[in-house]
Image (cartoon, rainbow, N blue to C red):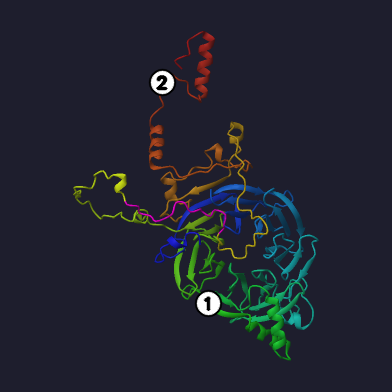
Amino acid sequence: MMNAPIIDPLQGDFPEVIEEYLEHGVMKCIAFNRRGTLLAAGCSDGSCVIWDFETRGIAKELRDKECVAAITSVCWSKYGHCILVSAADKSLTLWDVLNGERITRIVLQQTPLQARLHPGSSTPSICLACPLSSAPMIVDLNTGDTNTLPITVSDVSNGVAPASRNKYSDGTPPFTPTAACFNKYGDLVYVGNSKGEILIIDHNSNKLRAWVPVSGGAVIKNIVFSRNGQYLLTNSNDRTIRIYDNLLPLKNGLGVLDDLDKTIDEIDSVEKLKLVGSKCLALFREFQDTITKMHWKAPCFSGDGEWVIGGSASKGEHKIYIWDRAGHLVKILEGPKEALIDLAWHPVHPIIVSVSLTGWVYIWAKDYTENWSAFAPDFKELEENEEYVEREDEFDLILESEKVKESDVNEDDEVDIMTVDKDAFSDSDMSQEELCFLPAIPCPDVPEQQDKCGGSSSKLMDGNHSGSPLSEEAGQNGQMTNHASSPLEEDTGGTRIKRKRKPSEKGLELQAEKVRKPVKASGRLSKVKSKSMVDQDIHNSVNGDDVSDN
């Protein structure tokens, strides 16, 4: 963590209030790049918007003319040069972020609900797709070839990989979407199926290597690894989030599985897979709301893996639950009366980004308290005014020769400015330059162009106000602009934006006074004249009257 040494350990390193919100069309899903400097958001119109998270402005918009369906997921490549976008029209599109050009587009047989690039490759060539009505598959982005992964132990024991189908062979209810994810370096795929089982698969050989049954046997809806690869999270239909310890090494996990296969002597293949699975994952914690028994939406880890968050899946609720890794509920964040559909924790800072059903993105951050003594150690905070009596020599001039040096630092020592400290991204091999920021393209300040600037905004909210910007209080207090009244905010299809900040109280008072008092013409012409004034000027000029006073 960048600011870890100065964070108060008693406050807790997690967000508390809505700091700001982003608006651009109807956003459906979000994903941070590796460093958290850029935020990608998939929209309902098929476009992908990239926000500069430092300035809260749009840095790039990726739009494919062939795709007009809603985006279902977005995923960054390891070094941020590419973005993989899956859409409801069954397509997978790989984009070059810097140039804004489409690299490839592949259409699957089923709609991909989620797609993830291989995390160990700097130049992505394969991805993991989880379709709506078929088993997860490995997709070759260069050739378009697909390889369907096994999703049950019976599929492997029969020696047949499952084909795309709407029903199981035994006539059970329709196919349930299956969750899957890569491990940290992408040599294994972890699949959570509808029977409450975690399958560990070698995707190169399409072979099932281990099997871990989940207590309860409920459908697994989400499965995701922590950033450091040490913990695995599952979200099941039994309203429980489970955390597993990853017992395999982060690298060469396949080699350890080969050794386990040789050391475990078991005739029954299913029991052998179960024994190997017990050596791969160990249940660590379970999280649930024992009172409301609610379902969870988009659970994930914090950037450092110390916190676990999950959104309420209840309709009309925008609640985010935060637990520590020990299993204690430490905070419930309550947002506007809008359903929550996606969540993401910033990779570096204690910031959570949530997406509402209305398509707005809310940014949750810590509510920091001012501590002036942190900047001046000799500063003393007073609860009330005190009379101060100065010392007799307090303001006496002291000669330079009498001053005592406060520092023993040798000013002649050379300062090392070349050595780069190792950061929190331990898997960074510096083999390829990482894309952290996008060059800004300014919008020309021309009247014709200004009318096209709009449709997107980044809005600052009151620090202690965590309600919806659509609330009635905000409208009554004048804290929100009427979108229909300003030509600069009309959505005319343009991609350039101007940031809109909340006006100050003084600014609101001045605006109110201008409305109450008519503007006096003090020897200058008004920039905008009404139709009646223009007609009067024409009439006076025809009659030869002096129009200078108008």
In the rendering, at what x and y percent does residue 198 appear? 65, 77
In this rendering, the answer to whether 97 lies above or below 269 is above
Q: Nearer the observer, disc 1 or disc 2?
A: 1
Residue 393 at least partly seen: yes
- Measured Cα–Cα span from mark 1 to mark 2: 73 Å
In the rendering, at what x and y percent does residue 376 appear? 34, 53
Residue type of the residue flagged with mark 1:
Glu
Callout 2 secondary element? loop
Highlighted range, magenta: 404-420
- The residue that label 2 is drawn on is 522
- Left of 383 or right of it: where is 85? right
Residue at x 45% of width, y 55% of height: 467
In the rendering, at what x and y percent does residue 344 appear? 56, 61
Residue type of the residue flagged with mark 2:
Ser
- The circle on residue 154 is none
Q: Quadrant of residue 160?
A: bottom right
Residue at x 52% of width, y 23% of height: 531
- Left of 126 or right of it: where is 473? left
In the rendering, at what x and y percent does residue 172 appear? 71, 78
- The residue that label 1 is drawn on is 286
Nearest to N terminus: mark 1 or mark 2: 1
